[in-house]
């Protein structure tokens, strides 16, 4: 009798849903029934890549299908975004991007897509303040030292690419506010940028999480953090405000997007699963230990945050006069 009872229960649930005007979405119930492609807007080894892999692994475990990371670095993330924008809106292609997505909306005249119209924000995950990092052997111990030592000479700084928040923040702090001859050297992700600083080719890293392993190993040191208050993970490190630039803040977030017109039921399913991952004790502890804050919330909340970010970075880009080329 048990199979019959199970069948009756299924029919009853479906009937209640229809009566309530909430027909069951078979596509959402079955999702995912094949691997999901997660296009990351930057090279392997960087901040966005690390978060994408960490969350994708947990999504694979929870949903029983592989969430496969596909790194498409270059042009501040626009190459990956174009690829994702052209994908079928069925939930089987997702984009992982950072605050660079909001920057690029103003920085580039034509990126080949419209961030607001061509994508559905799915979930914000974490954010972290920008870090100003050098080799541990560097004579500077804080940003004030670095600025004083760099007066009258050229200073190079590496970032994860043109159009990243670290790029705009680097130009604004080092060139505009500090008055240095600061030269931006972009890479296709945070990993390659860190490698260049470790190798001595570039003096300073303006970035986020990719440098953490080397900071913990003692191979790199942090001169300042771009948050309004000191980081719990780096309590001895001054903020940019403390270095003499009041109100300076730059945070890079990592978000999941889907192509526009992806069914809301699927978007909400992914959102709920990502929020659940962020709430797992081991995951929350992992993010906190690296100076990151988690941002669980709805797709609508992420969409509002995205629009505010686009407006904020548009003002900063206008102030700095930074060009994409």
Image: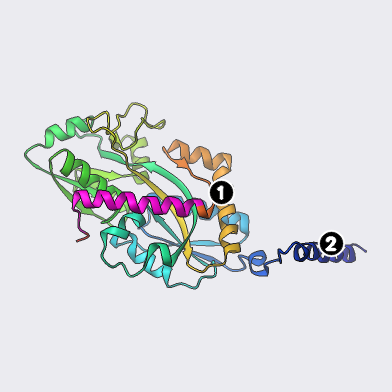
Q: Is residue 125 left or right of residue 211?
A: right
Disc ID at residue 72: none
Q: For numbered disc 1, what is the local secondary structure?
A: helix
Task: Give the mark nearest the N terminus, 2 or 1.
Answer: 2
Residue 316, magenta (yes or no): yes
Q: Nearer the viewer, residue 29 or 223?
A: 29
User: What stretch of residues is rendered in magenta?
Assistant: 301-323
Q: Is residue 175 left or right of residue 119?
A: left
Residue indicated by mark 1: 275
- Residue 60 location (% of width, % of height): 57, 57
Residue indicated by mark 2: 9
Q: Residue furthest top?
A: 236
> Which residue is rendered at x = 66% and y = 67% of the image?
30
Residue 317, magenta (yes or no): yes
- Residue 18 location (% of width, % of height): 76, 66
Q: Nearer the viewer, residue 311 or 293?
A: 311
Q: For numbered disc 2, what is the local secondary structure?
A: helix
Q: Mark 2 and mark 1: span between their CA atoms?
A: 29 Å
């Amino acid at each position: 009798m048990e199979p019959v009872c199970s069948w009756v229960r299924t029919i009853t649930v479906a009937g209640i849903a229809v009566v309530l005007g909430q027909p069951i979405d078979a596509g959402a119930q079955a999702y995912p029934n094949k691997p999901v492609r997660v296009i990351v807007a930057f090279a392997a080894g960087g901040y966005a890549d690390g978060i994408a892999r960490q969350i994708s692994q947990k999504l694979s475990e929870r949903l029983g299908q592989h969430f496969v990371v596909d790194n498409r670095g270059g042009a501040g993330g626009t190459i990956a975004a174009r690829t994702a924008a052209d994908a079928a809106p069925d939930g089987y292609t997702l984009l992982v991007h950072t605050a660079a997505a909001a920057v690029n909306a103003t920085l580039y005249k034509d990126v080949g897509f419209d961030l607001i119209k061509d994508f559905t924000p799915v979930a914000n995950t974490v954010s972290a303040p920008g870090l100003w990092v050098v080799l541990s052997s560097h004579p500077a111990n804080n940003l004030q030292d670095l600025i004083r030592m760099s007066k009258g000479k050229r200073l190079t700084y590496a970032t994860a690419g043109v159009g990243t928040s670290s790029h705009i923040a680097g130009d604004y702090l080092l060139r505009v506010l500090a008055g240095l001859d600061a030269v931006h050297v972009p890479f296709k992700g945070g990993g390659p940028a860190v490698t260049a600083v470790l190798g001595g080719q570039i003096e300073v890293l303006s970035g986020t999480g990719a440098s953490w392993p080397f900071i913990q190993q003692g191979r790199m040191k942090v001169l300042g953090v771009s948050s309004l208050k000191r980081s719990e993970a780096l309590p001895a490190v001054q903020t940019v405000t403390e270095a003499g630039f009041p109100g300076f803040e730059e945070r890079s977030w990592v978000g999941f997007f889907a192509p526009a017109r992806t069914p809301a039921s699927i978007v909400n399913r992914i959102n709920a699963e990502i929020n659940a991952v962020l709430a797992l004790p081991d995951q929350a502890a992992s993010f906190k230990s690296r100076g990151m804050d988690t941002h669980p919330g709805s797709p609508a909340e992420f969409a509002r945050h995205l629009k505010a970010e686009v407006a904020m970075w548009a003002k900063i880009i206008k102030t700095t006069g930074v060009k994409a080329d």
